[in-house]
Amino acid sequence: MLEVKGLRKSFGGSEILKGVDLSIGKGDVLAVLGPSGGGKTTLLRCLNFLERADAGTMTFLDRTMDMPGSGKKDIAAYRRHTAFVFQSFNLFANKTALQNVTEGLIVARKMARAEAEARAMAALERVGLADKRDAYPSQLSGGQQQRVAIARAVAGEPDIIFFDEPTSALDPELIGGVLDVIRALAEDGMTMIVVTHEVNFARNVSTRVLFMDGGKALAEEPTAAFFQEQKLERIQSFLRSLDRKEGEL
Amino acid sequence: MSERVLNILITSFPRILGQGLLVTIPLTVISFALALIIAVICAMVQIADVKGLKQIVRFYIWIIRGTPLLVQLYLVYFGLPDLGVALPAFPCAVAVFALNEGAYCAETVRAAIEAVPRGQMEAGYCVGMSYIQIMRRIVLPQAFRTAFPPLSNSLISMVKDTSLAANITVTEMFMTTQRVAGRTYEHLALYAEVALIYLIFCTVITWLQRLGEKKLNAMNGGNVIRA
């Protein structure tokens, strides 16, 4: 469904992405793992054109785009099929939960209000927050805000959702609820790319794993193979260090 | 207080207040409305980083903030006629006050827009909204809430600054008071009286500000927390 080749991105002379390839099929959940500073978030932001790649081509739903050269219209058309969930939620602070979900549908997609609200309510239902429809972001916990953000993403009926460390800004006791929502989406067959530090989540929910380090994809393989038959010493030591961290807690 | 002073105060009060309502308030309202327009345009030019225009805006703000308001009034009213540009007193005062306050408010508005977390802009793009749609529906309403108290401050300052227009022959409240005082020599009583009227005007604005903040808070969902 989505295939990217030769993705490169530099910031002020230092190259963050050094030619990354990836491909994801319909219904796949691709977990992106790796140490901080390895380029995971930049990769994801490039995939939704929040950062402009310096080089790379993207094939999405049988259309190929040159990533540095694509125009506003192409990007807008592409974003109609995608959704993005941010680490810091980024809900519109002046809108209620319901309005956060309907805003894009009504303003960008010109959907009738009644239809947009019905769709938004279904999305809020899905993340378990239908009763918070009239709450403003400042009245919601971090976990609830992130679930509203997921409802906002789902309501656009995207073909793929990008998650940028969706639980990294949350208190530990709120992480589970958000991961459950993402797991349920996976079970419904939603195609997703999830940048995460939650290794257990990657192990249990993802179908494939992309391991990023130093701006390169060191591995891209099925989840079972990644965790069970890991041959690369760099990845083994990364996984060991996480195990140790969890053991200490 | 002697009966004479009391009489002077009573007869001058409607006259001074009348000039306040007829000149000071319109001068303030028109100038401030224009200042706000100037401020929003200047803030947007700086934020959108429009090459060339941005430098002009910075230059304008630099000049205005670096020179006294009274000098600016004199330059335009007494100085520009030497170049063949002679404006009547009232429009001249409006132009100077608007340009002066616009420069200060431009910085207030710019700071308020920049205080809206950038992530909301990105989220807007990701749900398919355009720059203009995001500005109008998401960023500016929040920025306006942030800018409202400092802008109210500026408005209150401006009510009092309009007294400077007396220097360029605008017969507003202060000049009216000066005239009565010059004729009656009751300086203490009359200047205290006009001070009281300014205080009343500013009290009303303060009260309106509180009302406005309540309304804006309700529209923004309680106190806006910057996530």
Image (tube, rainbow, N blue to C red):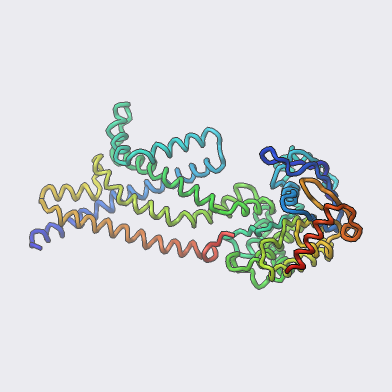
Q: Residue furthest top?
A: B83
Residue located 67% across and 50% down the image: B125
Locate residue A123, reporting x and y percent. Answer: 72, 65
Q: Nearer the viewer, residue A34 or A182?
A: A34
Locate residue B84, reporting x and y percent. Answer: 32, 27
Q: Which of the image's four quarters has the C terminus of chain B?
A: bottom right
Q: Nearer the viewer, residue A62 or A182?
A: A182
Q: Splitting the image into 4 quarters, where does residue A135 fall?
A: bottom right
Q: Splitting the image into 4 quarters, where does residue A66 fall?
A: top right
Above or below: residue A123 compared with residue A14:
below
Q: Residue furthest bottom?
A: A131
How many numbered discs?
0
Residue located 49% across and 61% down the image: B216
Residue located 83% across and 61% down the image: A206
Above or below: residue B106 compared with residue A246:
above
Locate residue B26, reporting x and y percent. Answer: 33, 49
Q: Which of the image's four quarters has the N terminus of chain B?
A: bottom left
Q: Nearer the viewer, residue A89 or B17?
A: A89
Q: Splitting the image into 4 quarters, where does residue A215 fall?
A: top right
Locate residue B170, reporting x and y percent. Answer: 25, 43
Is B43 left, or right, of A189 in this rendering? left
